[in-house]
Image (tube, rainbow, N blue to C red):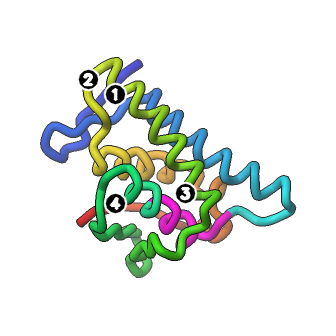
């Protein structure tokens, strides 16, 4: 498994954590598909991610998704879908195991945001109903 610097201090992300973030997103899509619902839209997805981060320990820091060619999207953790938040929470636990194995620490909140940015950078339409033409530049916290 490879790891690489994110360019933010000494933050790192890796292949296995990225795969696990992708698994969390796939779980969200699969659960909705079973109920004949479309994938969540970008606002629903980012709201659920923000809620999961809040329970992970980020407190009430704001979260904003910055995209190319469109307005920034500010997360509203209080409006999150519980199923989406829970899938991210489970993913965070699995990702934390990889960080502990390699770095002997939990992933930082910004590293989790970088992982989501990385995964959504490739085929975002796989995970969101309104992703046509979406280019996620960054998910910023705080």
Q: What element carries label 3?
A: helix
Identify the element where label 2 is drawn: helix
Q: Which quadrant of the figure has residue 10?
A: top left
Which is nearer the eye, 112 or 57?
57
**Which is more N-terminal, label 3 or label 4?**
3
Pick the quarter of the image with the C terminus: bottom left
Residue density around tag 1, few if under 14, some if 14–19, many if 20 or more, within 10 Å: some
Tell me whether circle 1 and circle 2 mark residues in contact (CB < 8 Å): yes
In front: mark 3 or mark 1? 3
The segment highlighted magenta reads 40-49
x and y, in percent, of residue 4 in the image: 28, 31
Bin the neighbour count of mark 2 within 10 Å (Cα to Cα): few under 14, some 14-19, many 20 and up.
few
Name the residue: 25% across, 42% down: 6
Q: Going by the image, does 109 lie left or right of 77?
A: left
Of the residues under marks 4 and 1, which one precedes in the sequence? 1
What's the CA distance linking mark 4 and mark 3?
20 Å
Mark 4 touching mark 1, by CB under 8 A? no
Task: Work out whether 9 lies above or below 76.
Answer: above
Tag 1, which secondary structure? Answer: helix
Q: Earlier in the sequence, mark 3 or mark 1?
A: 3
The residue where tag 3 is placed is 85
Q: In this view, does 45 lie above or below 88?
A: below
Disc 1 to disc 2, C-alpha distance: 5 Å
Question: Nearest the camera: 48 or 135?
Answer: 48
Whichever of labels 2 and 3 marks the residue nearer the N terminus, that label is 3
Q: Are marks 2 and 3 in contact (CB under 8 Å)?
A: no
Residue assigned mark 4:
138
In the image, taking residue 124 as reference, residue 16 lies left or right, namely: left
| Residue at the image position 30 percent from the left and 34 percent from the top | 106
- Counting from the top left corner in percent of width and height, residue 37 is at 80, 65
The residue singled out by tag 2 in the image is 103
Residue name at image x 40 percent, y 69 percent? 67
């Amino acid at each position: 498994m490879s790891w690489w610097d994110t360019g933010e201090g000494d933050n790192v992300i890796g292949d296995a954590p990225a795969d696990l973030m992708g698994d969390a997103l796939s779980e969200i899509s699969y659960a909705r598909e079973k109920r004949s619902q479309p994938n969540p839209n970008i606002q629903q997805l980012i709201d659920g991610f923000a809620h999961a981060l809040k329970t992970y320990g980020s407190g009430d820091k704001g979260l904003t998704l910055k995209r190319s060619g469109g307005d920034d999207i500010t997360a509203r953790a209080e409006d999150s879908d519980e199923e989406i938040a829970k899938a991210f929470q489970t993913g965070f636990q699995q990702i934390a195991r990889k960080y502990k194995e390699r770095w002997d620490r939990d992933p930082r909140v910004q590293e989790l945001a970088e992982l989501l940015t990385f995964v959504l950078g490739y085929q975002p339409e796989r995970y969101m109903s309104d992703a046509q033409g979406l280019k996620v530049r960054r998910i910023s916290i705080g």
